[in-house]
Image: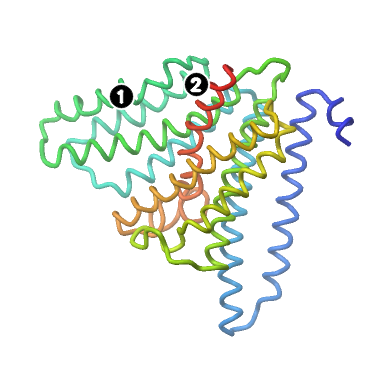
């Protein structure tokens, strides 16, 4: 089997990857559907099972949406893929700003963020201006936003308003822009297989986060930060990160990394993603909401889009720069 896969071209290997992923999603969706047909009672146990099935359906909807985005992007080329991720970043930033109170003096800054900063950042990614796109937001935009805000002549809660907008841009735009940037990394003798690197990052981070959540529910422990998250504890966190790291080693065959290197890169990504997820929970607690998105709804149809990609927004830049620095890609 391995020899057969090695004999395929890069495009055929990526196509095989998507066939496998779509097949697994179809099986999972069919399983959840069949289980939902069995739960028709009104007992407490049936209500509990239905609640968990609803969570599974929400996760599957998001997984289908993200997989389709990845597939359309790969099939249409790197420029289209970058555009699709820019759209995801746009909606994620919209969710973030929706829950952050704004004033009339913020309107110009918001226009700058959505219609100037975001397009330029993803254009820099699409044109492989790596040295500039890594500093464009942390340096130029972070200095420009308060200038535009000051010119609006509204000093009321000036620092708080600008910090919120800068943080939203950093997470939703800067973080997300590093996912399509992985498609453009070049490794000797590896070919045009950037889609494998994106799959590797998404799969290990999401798996680690999911395992952490499941372990905390199955074996509850005293939470480390109870006012932020009742499910975060060091035991479940360690198991989730370790699972993601081991999975990274198993998936080393689809990456330019050796097994040990793949485990190390997966460890870095999982730690960054899990801590990012915790940070975003703290922001939600500060705003007094359980989910991102208006009334818990989003373009995903479940919770908020940002709830599904927050770990990725933190993990992507750390993973990208770790890979680029260590391997000189």
Residue 291 quadrant:
bottom left
Residue 264 quadrant:
top right
Kindly identify the residue that appears in the image at 73 percent across and 62 percent down.
Answer: 31
Colouring used for the render: rainbow
Mark drawn on residue 254: none
Kindly identify the residue that appears in the image at 57 percent across and 75 percent down.
Answer: 48
Label 1 neighbour load within 10 Å: few <14, some 14-19, many 20+? some
The vertical placement of 51 against 20, above or below, is below
Horizontal relation, residue 104 to residue 259: left or right: left
Instruction: Quote the CA–CA distance across marks 2 and 1.
Output: 16 Å
Kindly identify the residue that appears in the image at 38 percent across and 46 percent down.
Answer: 95
The vertical placement of 291 against 85, above or below, is below
Q: Position of residue 66 (x, y in %)?
A: 59, 42
Q: Position of residue 278 (x, y in %)?
A: 42, 51
Horizontal relation, residue 315 to residue 283: left or right: right
Kindly identify the residue that appears in the image at 67 percent across and 28 percent down.
Answer: 257
Answer with mark 2 or mark 1, whichever residue precedes in sequence: 2
Looking at the picture, tell me which residue is in the foreground, 38 or 169: 169
Residue 246 quadrant:
top right
Looking at the picture, tell me which residue is in the foreground, 299 or 209: 209
**Residue hosting label 1:** 141
Q: Position of residue 13 (x, y in %)?
A: 78, 30
Disc 2 on helix, strand or loop? helix
Looking at the rendered image, the quarter that the N terminus falls into is: top right
Label 2 neighbour load within 10 Å: few <14, some 14-19, many 20+? many
Disc 1 on helix, strand or loop? helix
Looking at the rendered image, the quarter that the C terminus falls into is: top right
Mark drawn on residue 125: 2
């Amino acid at each position: 089997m391995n020899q057969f896969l090695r004999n395929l071209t890069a495009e055929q290997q990526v196509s095989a990857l998507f066939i496998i992923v779509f097949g697994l999603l179809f099986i999972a969706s069919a399983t959840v559907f069949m289980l939902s047909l069995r739960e028709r009672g009104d007992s407490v146990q049936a209500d509990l099972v239905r609640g968990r099935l609803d969570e599974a359906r929400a996760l599957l909807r998001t997984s289908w949406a993200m997989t389709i985005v990845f597939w359309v992007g790969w099939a249409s080329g790197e420029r289209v893929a970058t555009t699709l991720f820019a759209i995801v970043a746009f909606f994620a930033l919209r969710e973030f700003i929706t829950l952050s109170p704004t004033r009339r003096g913020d309107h110009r800054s918001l226009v700058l963020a959505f219609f100037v900063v975001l397009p330029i950042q993803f254009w820099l990614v699409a044109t492989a201006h790596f040295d500039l796109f890594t500093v464009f937001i942390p340096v130029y935009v972070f200095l420009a936003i308060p200038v535009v805000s000051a010119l609006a002549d509204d000093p009321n809660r000036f620092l708080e308003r600008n910090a919120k907008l800068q943080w939203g841009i950093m997470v939703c735009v800067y973080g997300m822009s590093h996912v399509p940037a992985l498609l453009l990394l070049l490794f000797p003798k590896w070919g045009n297989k950037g889609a494998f690197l994106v799959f590797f990052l998404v799969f290990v981070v999401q798996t680690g986060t999911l395992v952490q959540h499941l372990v905390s529910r199955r074996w509850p422990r005293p939470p480390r930060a109870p006012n932020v998250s009742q499910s975060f504890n060091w035991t479940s966190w360690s198991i989730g990160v370790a699972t993601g790291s081991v999975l990274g080693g198993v998936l080393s065959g689809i990456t330019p990394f050796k097994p040990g290197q793949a485990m190390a890169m997966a460890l870095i990504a999982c730690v960054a993603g899990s801590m990012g997820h915790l940070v975003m929970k703290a922001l939600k607690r500060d705003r007094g909401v359980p989910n991102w998105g208006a009334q818990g709804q989003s373009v995903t149809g479940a919770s908020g889009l940002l709830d599904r990609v927050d770990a990725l927004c933190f993990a992507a830049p750390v993973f990208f720069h770790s890979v680029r620095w260590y391997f000189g890609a």
